[in-house]
Amino acid sequence: MACKYFTKNRNINDLSPRMAKKVKLWQKGDPDVWKAIFIDIGLRNAEHQNCLFRHGFSQLDGYKYLSKHQLGEAIDIAFRKAFVRKTEGIDSIYPEKKETWQWVADSAQKYGIKWMYPVWGWDRPHFEDDGNPIPQKNWWEKAREWAMAKGITNGERPHDHLTRAELWETLKKSNFL
């Protein structure tokens, strides 16, 4: 690639504070995905962005039109070659199957990071801050952890309806009656 003389900045701490926090939460929250992927580039300067633009790899020139990478609000991801070789049988850091990318996108979305390929129709590696606040734990998470520690519940199926039998068992275990 013509812009390869630029050093790729993969440092999460150089991203905007909100994007850095979202990426760190994503890494911690879904380690299986991060065994398959890595950050190929995060923050980039105007000169690097312009090089990509001049060679047809971006539609933003880096000076008049800024990339989210320049603002620290985007990352490009790549896959570990061993993962792609195992799942798709090709020697590349960029899988061909959309399902492989979608698996990562579904994971990223939980942490407020959006895959832009479906929006633009090009640039599969590009993921950016969705503009929303950093996702917080569910409001009921502390109560669930407390109930699990007390042996009242195993914590599974938090969104399912509660049957009468389960309510009776929960009341019995909690010494409510």
Image: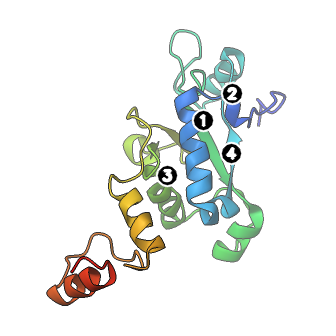
- The circle on residue 80 is none
Residue situated furthest right in the rendering: 5
| Image side of residue 50 versus residue 106, left or right | right
- The circle on residue 20 is 1
| Image side of residue 151 versus residue 7, left or right | left
| Whole-percent x, y for residue 10 in the image | 73, 37
Q: Residue at x 34, y 76 (%)?
A: 157
| Image side of residue 17 versus residue 143, left or right | right
Label 4, on which residue?
Answer: 39
Q: CA distance from mark 1 to mark 3?
A: 13 Å
Circle 2 packing at 10 Å, graded few (<14), some (14-19), many (20+), is: some
Q: Are marks 2 and 1 in contact (CB under 8 Å)?
A: yes
Label 3, on which residue?
Answer: 108
| Image side of residue 138 versus residue 76, left or right | left
Question: What amino acid type should be assigned to the residue bearing mark 3?
Answer: Ala
Disc nearer the start of the sequence (1/3): 1
Q: Residue at x 69, y 27 (%)?
A: 14
> Regarding mark 3 in the picture, which secondary structure is present there?
helix
Disc nearer the start of the sequence (2/1): 2
Circle 3 packing at 10 Å, graded few (<14), some (14-19), many (20+), is: many
Q: Residue at x 59, y 26 (%)?
A: 72
| Whole-percent x, y for residue 124 in the image | 54, 48
| Whole-percent x, y for residue 61 in the image | 57, 17
Considering depth in this image, is 30 or 75 the residue closer to the camera?
Answer: 30
Label 2, on which residue?
Answer: 14
